[in-house]
Image: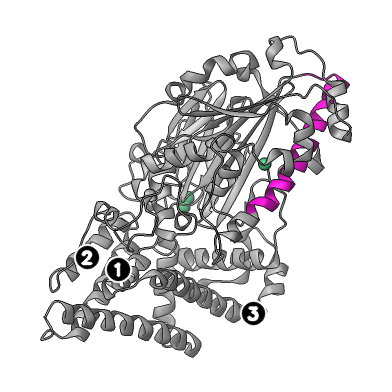
Amino acid sequence: MGVALQTTGKDRRKELILSTIQTIASDGISNVTLAKVASNSELSPAIINFYFKTKKQLLLDTLVFLEQEWTSILQSRLEHAVSAEQRILGYIHSCFDQRIFVADKIAAWYAYWSANHAVKDYRDILTRSDQFDIQLIKECVADLLDQSNSSKLDAEVLARGLQGLTDSLWRQALISSDSISRKDAVEMCERYLSQFMTFDHAPFESDFKNNEVSDLLPFWTYQDDEFFELELERLFQPNWMLVGHVSEIPAPGDYLTFQGFGERALVVRDKSGKVNAFHNICRHRGSTILTGEGRCRQSLSCPFHGWRYNFDGKLQFVPGQSGFSNLDPEKYSLKPVDLEIWNGFVFIRFVSGGASVQEQMQPIEHEIEHYRLNELQPYQEPAQYAFQNPESLPINWKIYHDIDNEGYHVPIGHPTLQQLYGLSYVDSYVKDIPISKGRFNERVGNLWSVKHYRNLMPKFEHLPDDRQDLWLYIGIFPNLVLALYPEMVEIYMSIPCTPTRTEVIGKCYALPDERRGIKALRYLNRRINMITAGEDYFYMNAMQEGLKSSVFPKWTLSETAETGIRAYHHAIQTRLPVAKLENKPRPGT
Ligand code: FES
Ligand SMILES: [Fe+2]
């Protein structure tokens, strides 16, 4: 689905700035060089010179980036706040926002603070930002004191106390990034406030009163930072994520990686043939160990300082080990991640608990039994119709699935698909698993791809008659679709990056078959699907943009042709009841 996007100058510039932040965190601000930034970003020094003429400029622009990031996160929370309490909570949540409260950025902020006496430009930016923050906190605290009849207390002192507390929590995270969670940090600040004011910790439930309830996801859930974080925590981290297929890692040392919603994992086959999954986080200082996919010869080697791990995750070698006096290699194995292989597909899960993929998908086993999924091999897509993984789309991740969960748009929105199977397309459910089926129209049609695809379609011996002319789509909650065609299998899934940016990952697999006619058939499949994806890309963008409009109507769904959307929204609301609220609840509740 969707179309390939090229890396823009803006993206590349951001990439370099993020690499600078990483370099400051690892080497200290005074040791940053353009060459180190280039090597961390895997770009040539010439590219850095193109975007930033000097190291001084690069460092200054990096601070500007950090400051703008902070301001925009804070402002987006303040925008929705209508009371002093909501504003102060907005400030606290921004301090510990997952985009900011991360080890490298914390280290970079402190590095700039410590360098500010020597560089006036840093001092100006930091002072401006600091003054804005303290003024905001002071005003909120003063209002809150008024409301709680505690006006004898000194608002400025209490405001500085809160700022000092957030600073102390940041310093704790600077020293040891996993010693304090974002949730604990926010709670500590709330406890501070409750020392001198009546602080309403009203749970979500209280918001249901006086707030209309909707059985569709309200628009705010498509563009809200706080809800987005909740989705990552409740819908993504505890659910199974597809990494690939066992056929992609046939030999010892073959690996695949997964990256999304702040988590990284690697899947590797060990020397006994077993497939293992680990957090892709080096136990030394947290670097990514492997990227993309490939084959390691002897061990998993961290590119940062060269710590090496066996394929079963055990720490094997530490350069200069004598410098680490109490390092017990037994205690420094890579951290495992839940792993399940289901019909050859490799799934991982970051938070344990709940049903296995096998249990979850058991109700539709009969739908997939003939496709020999265990025997699939990666299918090399024709270049012009290949997914450019990962595509990044300017949409909320749910938009991607909303459009996929109904066939009402096929007759008008997808002329090619309509000609292939539009007359019979139907969405249904087996238990709560969405299944969509399109059976080829009786008339072959005249569009080039459809006509040739239909004419080339042979009989596939491994499939029963009712699968010979069927395109079958199966949803795996929350973000994956398995598309089963007679001649091949496709998977596509969404990985949320921000409330309004989503990566889309797709791959194709097929049973080995070198016949020319089959190759042509698969080529035509990709062509039809990529035409369709281009059309969907347009509709998805338009939907996301439409959410902002002041005259956007409430959604009106067909009771027959758009039931898939309603069911999908229901599945999300069941897991996140706050998503039933028509209006966004107060920040921090
Ligand atoms: S972070 Fe130092 S070796 Fe991996
Ligand atoms: Fe579509």
Q: Which residues are magenta?
A: 513-540
Residue 55 in the image: above or below residue 204: below
Q: Secondary structure at mark 3?
A: loop
**Which residue type carries mark 2?**
Glu
* Residue 494 seen in the current view: yes
Q: Is residue 67 left or right of residue 492?
A: left
| Residue 344 at x, y percent in the picture | 57, 22
Q: Nearer the viewer, mark 2 or mark 3?
A: 2
* Residue 180 seen in the current view: no
Whichever of callouts 3 and 1 sits on the residue coming sooner in the sequence is 3
The answer to whether the residue labelled 2 contacts the one labelled 1, judged by CB atoms less than 8 Å apart, is: yes
Residue 128 in the image: above or below residue 548: below
Q: Which mark is residue 54?
A: 3
Quarter holding the C terminus?
bottom left
CB at disc 1 and ligand 1 closer than 8 Å: no
Q: Residue drawn 44% across and 35% down?
A: 313
Whichever of callouts 2 and 3 sits on the residue coming sooner in the sequence is 3
**Which residue type carries mark 3?**
Thr
Gap in angstroms between the C-alphas marked 2 and 3: 43 Å
The answer to whether the residue labelled 3 contacts the one labelled 1, judged by CB atoms less than 8 Å apart, is: no
Q: Which mark is residue 194?
A: none
CB at disc 3 and ligand 1 closer than 8 Å: no
| Residue 528 at x, y percent in the picture | 78, 36
